[in-house]
Amino acid sequence: MTAKRVDVLQPLFERLKKASEGEFKDAVIFGLPAGTGGRSSVVAVTMVKFEDHDCFDAAVRTLPSGLRLIGLVEFSETDADQRLYTVVENVTDPILIKVTDGKISASCGLDYLTPMHLSVVSLNDFWGNIVCTFRIQGKILLTSLLEKPELENCFAQAKNRIANQASYELSEKPATYILPRDGNFVTEIESKKKISTVADLFRNMKKDKDGNTTYFQTNLALLDVTILYDHSKVSSRDVAPIIRSDASARCKYFEYYVNIDALVVVPMSTNVNKLYRQFNSAVCSQLENGFHDNITFQLKYSIFAEKPEVFHFWLPFAQHFVTVAYPQNTSEEKLKDTRLLLHKVFYVRETRPYFRRSAALFQSFLGLISPHVGLTGKYSETQIIRGHLEYKHYMQDDFNDDGWGCAYRSLQTIISWFRLQGFTAAKVPTHREIQECLVSLGDKPHDFIGTKRWIGSTEVAFVLEALLGISCRIISISSGADMASRASELESHFKIHGTPVMIGGGVYAHTIIGVSRDPDEEANVQYLILDPHYTGKDDLNAVLPGKSGWLNYYSGQS
């Protein structure tokens, strides 16, 4: 289907519009081709650097199934590198996005350019209304000698098993849907709602998202899928086993269940009878491009291979998923080259980590993750933290710190931010561990450990420097009423650094994660607050609105 329109995801459009000379050289476009799910338009989701085949292969391995190569980008009056035309020559009706002096146009075809209408699609519209993301999880047994022929056979059998034996389960109370090989859903309950498209399925399955899980997108249409099949070992051959023995060689062999964790992006308009094939394709792609390639790469440098483990990341500047298989029991330092390649592939500056395991999505936490996401400030000048954090407050972790632990909780919230941004793999310290740290620094006497004594901004700064190597700046103000005079300074901090700010006065402390101010009236200021004094359950509806959120918190306070 030849499209007449290309929809460009808003973050991609903004990056292209603001691109400096040579910033996005060698860019190819991934997205949804025309005709996908019956859609008439092309959707351009992200751009990938095609410096060489390593870059391109890394993009194919890590982008969600369903996003495909659809075209390329040209900047200024110069034509794109001929290699880019070669890589898209097998794409049906490839698109060409041209960027000249900040103006963006689109056309279809490479030899005979047909102008296309270009429109911008918002994040919420794309991830919440245009597509549904399915997260497919399950286990599959891999058994093989660590040599190329045996590995190839092992993964061929695994993919064959998925193709011939797998069914899929989507379960959200009260409905459970089974998707067998014939592609027709089976449900345990009688449903009066007709399910013909993915949109119908999502409406039936939709529920409030768990606030304790790092989804990182406010309007994400996401459904969990479980792979169902017989886990028992069954011989794939009707022949006697062959045993080979080589006394001079050390046997290189592995047997383990790998955890499939694949993402597939499907237009809401897609007929549900096409889902089985797409689920199979996503799982087999992860087996081949994720696990097989990962193990093969490890064997270049070692006689053994660690079990691959899947991590999903959400790129904040591009606003899409990236999925990476890292070998278990491997230090971040040894994974540095892999991460640097991903930075290059997605045009990510190396000033901040984005692909460390501690920054992965879908981790489960005791506290709410970024309860502020989706809240908007009142005034025109608004800045909030970059990234996400875990909201820590009184009475969490089955620990009663009501009345004395607010600064401890604010410190824990700040450390969770550094962890979720990938700056550290250190766990969030307990109250006792914070006290032990202060004692080891000589700031507190030994009998401080295990007490209910307060700490303040100075102690928070000491612990951050000791545990994370983070230097802090402490600013004194005479009263809460003077906070408005610091609003522009806070705005600059969030814009440049993006880290949370702990504020404490006397025995009272909490966390500021954003500021919204009226540039024409200094007194008109709102602060985005996470209040550690909350003692209730980690329920988003209970936390917001309340003491946490956009508040005129310091007006007249002492």
Image (tube, grey):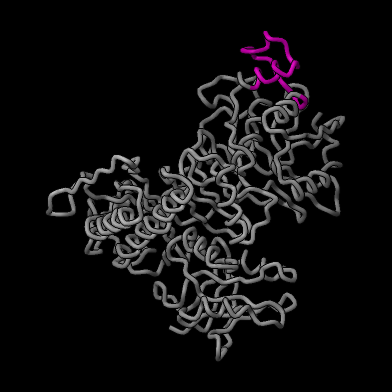
**Which residue range is magenta in the image?**
434-458
Q: Quadrant of residue 306?
A: top left
Q: Residue at x 61, y 21 (%)?
A: 433
Res. 137 in view: yes
The spot of residue 396 in percent (x, y) is: 54, 27
Horizontal and vertical percent position of residue 186: 23, 57
- Please, which residue is most extreme toward the front here? 248
Q: Nearer the viewer, residue 229 or 496?
A: 229
Q: Is residue 162 above or below residue 36?
A: above
- Is 17 drawn above or below residue 472 in the view shown? below
Can you give x and y, in whole percent of width and height, for residue 57 in the image? 49, 64
Give the camera-side residue of 522 and 388.
388
Which quarter of the picture shows residue 309? top left
Residue 219 shown in magenta = no
Q: Is residue 18 left or right of residue 284?
A: right
Q: Quadrant of residue 552?
A: top right
Residue drawn at 77 percent across, 54 percent down: 381
For the point 49% across and 54% down, which residue is it?
323
Image quarter in which the C terminus is found: top right
Location of the N terminus (image quadrant): bottom left
Q: Nearer the viewer, residue 343 or 220?
A: 343
Q: Is residue 448 above or below residue 466?
A: above
Q: Is residue 256 visible?
A: no
